[in-house]
Image (tube, coloured by chain):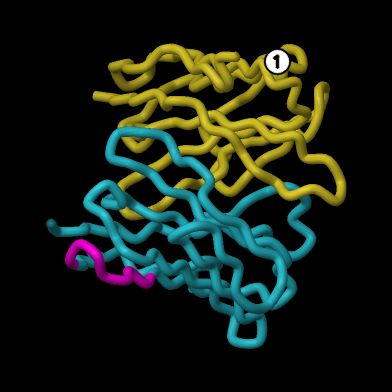
Amino acid sequence: QKEVEQNSGPLSVPEGAIASLNCTYSDRGSQSFFWYRQYSGKSPELIMFIYSNGDKEDGRFTAQLNKASQYVSLLIRDSQPSDSATYLCAVVLNNAGNMLTFGGGTRLMVKP
Amino acid sequence: NAGVTQTPKFQVLKTGQSMTLQCAQDMNHNSMYWYRQDPGMGLRLIYYSASEGTTDKGEVPNGYNVSRLNKREFSLRLESAAPSQTSVYFCASSEALAGSYNEQFFGPGTRLTVL
């Protein structure tokens, strides 16, 4: 079992819809969770981080964390074609210091 | 500020050749990282340097060596390239202060092909 798992997609949503991206992790002691966006041929960029159970909102993005079920999700409201990218979930596993473990990424396609 | 820079952007090697990928950051960050990215596998950590003068292995260190030349620069060396090392290589850096979140800033990547 991979330590951080994501559905590779592609996840296709129409413009204006809510895109829901999910990530599960195996280490129950993990404390910090990050969502990176990566456009094709570009480097990853951080869009959200979350440490506590519950929801965290930033503009059209909402990160949701459920430590009991060991999953973290990213919701993108009012999806735009410019949101089409690969979304990478990253976790600081327990006792991993400052190291991130990445999932394989979910490719999102927003169709006009 | 340039952020994190990497050279070269593209490279083609023959099996058995050696090369060094260069990375530099101008954000005064303590920690630096080397990742490789293969299709569908996300980013996998090769080596990292938590602070100047220290380096540690990550998930996939075999076939690679690193040097933290100073606080700004962190290089990755392939001594004898193999086709399995064909990948996109990303360098990243972070402040990595205790109690702060660990945003890593990535360079533009080096696309390496080993024939």
Q: Where is residue A63 in the image (x, y as percent from the top left)?
A: 54, 67
In screen coordinates, is A74 left or right of B34? left
Classify 10 Å Cα crowding around label 1: few (below 14), some (14-19), many (20 and above). some
Check the image and report above or below for A12 versus B5. Answer: below
**Quarter location, residue B55:** top right
Mark 1 residue type: Arg
Name the quadrant of the N terminus of chain B.
top right
Q: The cyan chain is which one?
A: A
Taking B96 as reference, is B86 left or right? Answer: left
Name the spot of residue B111 as percent of width and height, x first.
34, 25
Residue farthest to the bottom, as pictured: A68
Q: How many discs appear?
A: 1
In the picture, residue B94 is in which quadrant?
top right
Q: What stretch is highlighted in magenta?
A: A14-20
Q: Chain B is drawn in which colour?
A: yellow
Horizontal placement of A99 versus A107: left or right? right
Residue depicted at x 62% and y 34%:
B33
Q: Residue at x 67, y 35 (%)?
A: B48
Depth check, front residue: B55 or B24:
B24
Residue B34, placed above or below residue A74:
above
Q: Is A18 contained in the magenta span?
A: yes
Q: What element carries label 1?
A: loop
Percent from the top left, x then y, of residue A28? 69, 77
Tell me the quadrant of the picture where the C terminus of chain B can be found.
top left
Q: In this figure, which residue is indicated by the disc labeled 1?
A: B72
Q: Which of A12 and B62 is in front in this view?
A: A12
Hey, which quadrant is residue A20 in on the image? bottom left
Q: In this view, does A58 lie above or below A63?
A: above
Residue extending furthest toward the right: B98
B66 vs B30, nearest the viewer: B30
